[in-house]
Image (cartoon, grey):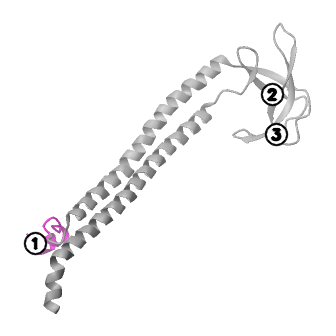
């Protein structure tokens, strides 16, 4: 075998200075790398897929249970926004609509910023005729899915890194104990020579 080839592939296992703790440390580094690069993204993906199925089913159930009603803004919307969310600034305003075969109903609903009296808005009612929040749309389902997936992947990575920090602390204690034992065996021979 050529010397140049041998220098690129050092035989670390036969190194007399290589301690057992060094071998363990190398194995732990490989395991941590696999956990961070493969297992954490995989758990995030699995959690995201599971969450997507549940969120989509929940949104479909809500769409089936709730019905949209066109209403007219009867009063002037509040000047201060009540919520700032994925729909932008939302104000409270009195809205009015007429149910088929029934009387006219009035309620206070969330309307987008810039809505004026007389504008038409969509409100959602449940099976009992109570005003409810709109069912989540596809964008909300995907946002929820991605958030959960990233959270699970990040949580898994954080647990792996925390376990690695604990392992390093324990490994350092073992390494120091190994050095103490090695010095206890070789130290007296060195000190006798100097004396």
For the residue pair 92 and 168, the one nearer the viewer reads as 168
Kindly state the secondary structure of the residue where label 2 is placed. strand
Instruction: Choose the circle earlier in sequence order: 3 or 2.
Output: 3
Labels 3 and 1 touching (C-beta < 8 A): no
Residue 176 falls left or right of residue 122: left
Residue at (51, 44) in percent of width and height: 151
Residue at (57, 37) in percent of width and height: 144
Give how far apart the Cα atoms at labels 3 and 1 are: 76 Å
For the residue pair 80 and 19, the one nearer the viewer reads as 19
Residue 188 vertical placement versus 6 (above, below): below
Instruction: Choose the circle earlier in sequence order: 1 or 2.
Output: 1
Instruction: Choose the circle earlier in sequence order: 3 or 1.
Output: 1
Residue 44 vertical placement versus 65 (above, below): below
Q: Is residue 6 magenta?
A: yes
Q: Residue furthest left?
A: 1
Residue 7 falls left or right of residue 27: left
Residue 72 coordinates in the image, percent (x, y): 86, 25
Residue 163 vertical placement versus 53 (above, below): below
Residue 190 coordinates in the image, percent (x, y): 16, 85
Labels 3 and 2 touching (C-beta < 8 A): no
Q: Return the residue at label 1.
A: 2
Q: Return the residue at label 3.
A: 113
Mark count: 3
Q: Which segment did they paint magenta?
A: 1-14
Residue 162 coordinates in the image, percent (x, y): 42, 55
Residue 25 coordinates in the image, percent (x, y): 28, 61
Q: Return the residue at label 2.
A: 121
Quadrant assignment for the C terminus? bottom left
Q: Is residue 12 magenta?
A: yes
């Amino acid at each position: 075998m050529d010397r140049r080839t041998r220098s690129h592939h050092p035989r670390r296992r036969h190194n007399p200075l290589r301690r057992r703790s060094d071998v363990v440390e190398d194995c732990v580094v490989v395991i941590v790398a696999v956990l961070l690069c493969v297992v954490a993204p995989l758990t995030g993906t699995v959690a995201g897929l599971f969450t997507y199925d549940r969120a989509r089913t929940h949104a479909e159930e809500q769409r089936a249970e709730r019905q949209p009603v066109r209403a007219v803004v009867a009063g002037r919307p509040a000047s201060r926004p009540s919520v700032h969310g994925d729909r932008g600034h939302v104000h409270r305003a009195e809205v009015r609509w007429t149910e088929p075969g029934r009387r006219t109903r009035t309620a206070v609903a969330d309307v987008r910023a810039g809505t004026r009296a007389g504008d038409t808005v969509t409100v959602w009612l449940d099976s009992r005729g109570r005003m409810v929040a709109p069912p989540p749309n596809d964008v909300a389902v995907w946002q929820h899915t991605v958030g959960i997936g990233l959270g699970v992947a990040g949580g898994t990575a954080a647990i792996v890194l925390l376990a690695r920090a604990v392992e390093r602390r324990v490994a350092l204690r073992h390494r120091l104990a190994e050095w103490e034992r090695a010095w206890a065996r070789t130290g007296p021979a060195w000190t006798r020579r100097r004396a």
